[in-house]
Amino acid sequence: MTAPDPTREASAARGADRALRAAARHSGGRLAAAAACSVAAAGAALAEPALLGHTLDLLLRQDPAGARWTAWCAAVIAAEVLLDAVTARLTGGVDARSTAWLRRLGLGRLLRAAPHHAARHSPGELSARLTAQATTAGAVPAAVVGAAVALLPPLGGLVALVLVDVWTALAFLAGLPLLALLLRAFARDSGASVSRYQEVQLAMAGRLVEALAGARTIAAAGTAEREQARVLRRLPELGAEGRRTWRIYGTTVARTSALMPLLLYVVLGVGGVRLAEGALGVGGLLAAVRYAGLAAGVGAVTGRLAAVVRGRAAARRTAALFDLPELPQGERRLPEGGPGTLELRGVRVVREGTEVLRDIDLRIPGGTTAAVVGRSGSGKTTLAAVAGRLTACDAGRVLLDGVPLDELSAGELRREVGHAFERPALFGEGVAAAIAFGSGPAPAPESVRAAARAAGADAFVRRLPQGYDTALADAPLSGGELQRLGLARAFCRAGRLLVLDDATSSLDTLTAREVERALAHDVRPGTRLVVAHRISAASRADLVVWLDAGRVRATGPHAQLWRDPAYRAVFGAGAEPGGGREAEPAAAASALATAPVPAPPAAGGPDAQRNAGSDAATGAAPAWAEGTGLGSAATPGRAPAEGPEEGPDTGLVAAPTPRTGAAPVEGPDTGPAAAGGDGGRSGGRRAPGRETVR
């Protein structure tokens, strides 16, 4: 096991103590009331022996005042019992409030942190930190107050014992140094053991959640026993630390339990001698024995001390979430009617000591669709996160319509910058709520349905048992359907900048085209930043940003970049010069790109059918076909508008849609494709019968 870093441990302990003090202030009123009741109960406990001793002497002398003092004794005993009950009730409330406060604080910091910071902790660890360990930590404020108040009866009993008879007090004091050594050793040893126990527990929780999330993969691989062994690998270590913790606690309790009765017997013996000498009365002896019993209660502080030790160790785990850095935001707003111009100036991003992005200088004009392409690991997703302010850059600035994103208010930022992801997470009671999910006023039901239509989700949503009101738990969704609902959510709240991080990867080619066409015509106009892996998405974009090893290697139209063999190699369509056989497809693609443009055939004629079939077979878009989604029409000298792609849901090569007025082919897993004679971007007009999502 890795040796702990003392400096880091000390810093974590200080952070945990600050969090616990803040939790105590959050429940300050109830905590003060519990402390007051506990102190009053301790006072009643201290008064009880003196009252009992005095009442006993009065009764032995048959003094008439004995009856009145007996009533006083009964009242003090009843008050002590009542105060203890009220203290227990208030303590429970303080524990609950402190736990809730720690959980809200930890969860809030977790959700406000940049995703890469939150990803440092596994889901299992996060669950353990925010549940069991937050509960243990939440008990610390009341436990500290209880431990402090628990010292009052022993200390008060010792003082009273001195006042009753100094010799009995000296007899008791002889054993206290040994008791102090026992408690000090317990605090030291149990603290280290509890910390190691909780560390192992967190690691096991993380592995368990990983295994549950990958249950299908484990079943398919037939590795259930291996994964079970991996999850439980540290179970012996957990058991050893647990046994060590309880052994330390049990040993301390056993020693203090043996020491305290011995001290009481010594006090009783000395008191008996003093009684025989006439220096102490019967009532005085009773009071001395009772006060010695209260003084011996210092051993009971062990249990309170154990709760404090466990709670502080748990607080160090929970407080790790409080240190997650938040994304700073300002209070500025964007200029009204801005086109959505996105600028990155000298952007640099470092992750785990490695430069993921460096020297990024980029300007995307408002209303432009920019495709970000590059090999795996080139920094595409990080660029998308920086552009949408999901994470901060370590150097440089990102501006939207001239305003730095870090100076925008959080509300303004999320209203004007939307995101769609490769693996979206859906929140809400039903499908409609999941699409409408976001900050600000809830969109109208018509806007929700329009967004679903634009994302190609309306057809399968209507087939669900309760349509848009179907609970998410009752809606079995494929990967493509889940992705379309994520797109619908982004379209529903689209602002002037929309970031699509590989958000159509699970869609078949035909559905992806329909989504791109709807994005161009049916969603609020604005700037689109699309992380693309398909050659079709790059070819239909207005601008391509080519990333290579965290730097912008080139920008420009797809057709222009296509002349570079290294760019073609990004899509597997070619290789660097001298690449042997791999260069052959690149040469063929280049020949297609530079082929002369035939005249447009008559709509629906045999030539059109023949050309469309030929284009589908070769994977190239008809030279006469207008762009079908994000980009402009194919022109002479441009790269093929569509490569030979295989849709993940269908396994079929999709033919592009000519501008002949024929209805597009209905793709599987999509519902009926939207009809419209103009599949391209003719004059920026919307397809008839569609509603623009705003």
Image: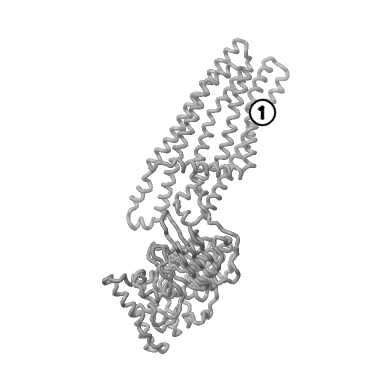
Instruction: Relative to 529, say whether 276 is above or below.
Output: above
Please tell me which residue lies in front, 344 or 439. Answer: 344
Residue at position x 31%, y 76% in the image: 587
Question: Residue 511: image x %, image y %?
Answer: 43, 73
The quadrant where residue 559 appears? bottom left
Q: Amino acid at mark 1?
A: Val
Instruction: Estimate the x, y position of residue 240 in percent, counting from the top left.
Output: 39, 38
**View extreme (left): residue:** 580
Q: Nearer the viewer, residue 356 or 154?
A: 356
**Figure disc tally:** 1
Query: x%, y% of residue 486?
Result: 48, 65
For the point 34% across and 80% down, which residue is it? 592
Establish if 587 lies above or below 50. below
The residue that label 1 is drawn on is 76
Q: Left or right: where does residue 288 sit relative to residue 631? A: right
Could one spot residue 291 in this view of the protein? Answer: yes
Q: Residue shown at 47%/64% (left/top)?
A: 384
